[in-house]
Image (cartoon, helix red, strand yellow):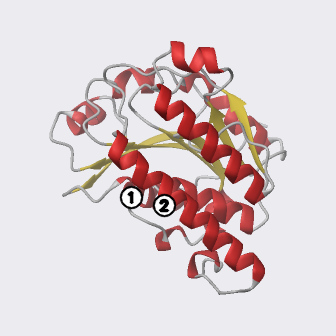
Amino acid sequence: MGKARIVAVMPAYNAEATLEKTWRDIPPGVVDEVIVVDDGSQDRTVEIARSMGLTVVLHPETRGYGANQKTCYDEALQRGAEIVVMIHPDYQYDSRLTPFLTGFIEAGVCDVVLGNRIRTRREALANGMPAWKYVANRVLTFIENVVLGQNLGEFHSGFRAYARRVLETIPYHRNSDDFVFDTEILVQAVHFGFRLGDVPVPVRYLPGSSSINFRRSITYGVQTLLVLLRFIAQQLGVRQDPIFTRRQ
């Protein structure tokens, strides 16, 4: 452990108020490089990232959350990352716990590790998670665990780590440019036989934390269920879905 090249990627959009706090909480020496991919922010996100000496990649116009991640992973792989950890730069996740996510991959226990924000209902709600979002998270996670044969605490975390071999296998460029990208890549990981795990992280919904609204959350929920149906169809041999074809 401790020998893998670890690159942290931050898909950023208008994160000027929280980017530096998120970065400073990463324990010294844990990651070898931090890449900020800015998705057409209208604030000082890029200026702040550059002032901290971080690697900055720009989207000249907003492409979407999924498209941002595609660039994040492309850049990390090109820079020789053996483990890639995604941290939302909105300070919703506790980046001090980065070595715990990457450690399970370094030890050969998992290929994908997620930060699980839902340790208890009381804690999640007390720390600002909207009640409707909590319920939706619980329902979707239950369905995903049943369909995918997993036992994760939650599938909808923006704090996650991947082994290089996962990103080299999954055809993530065929995924959505929107929020459902997060679901697609996990369903793909299950399809290709990678080992998923999670670690507890505190949940914190702060004024500066990004969060999709109720309407977009409904869309995301429906899209998540459709991805699961595509997975079932693939497993039953009903159709050959391109998102489940190994990356070339």
Judge by depth and name the residue closer to the eye, 3 or 26.
26
Horizontal and vertical percent for residue 248?
60, 82
What residue lies at 69% left-to-right and 79% top-to-bottom?
Answer: 234
Residue 242 shown left or right of residue 18 in the figure: right
Residue 177 seen from this side: yes
Horizontal and vertical percent for residue 144?
68, 53
Horizontal and vertical percent for residue 55?
37, 44
Q: Secondary structure at mark 1?
A: loop
> Sequence-wise, which precedes: disc 2 or disc 1?
1
Residue 27 seen from this side: no
Say if mark 2 contacts mark 1, CB within 8 Å: yes
Vertical relation: 136 (above or below) 120 = below
Q: Distance between the Cα atoms at labels 2 and 1?
A: 10 Å
The disc labelled 1 sits on which kind of residue? Asp
The disc labelled 2 sits on which kind of residue? Gln
Instruction: Please give the label number shown on residue 90.
Output: none
Residue labelled with disc 2: 223
Judge by depth and name the residue closer to the eye, 29 or 174.
174
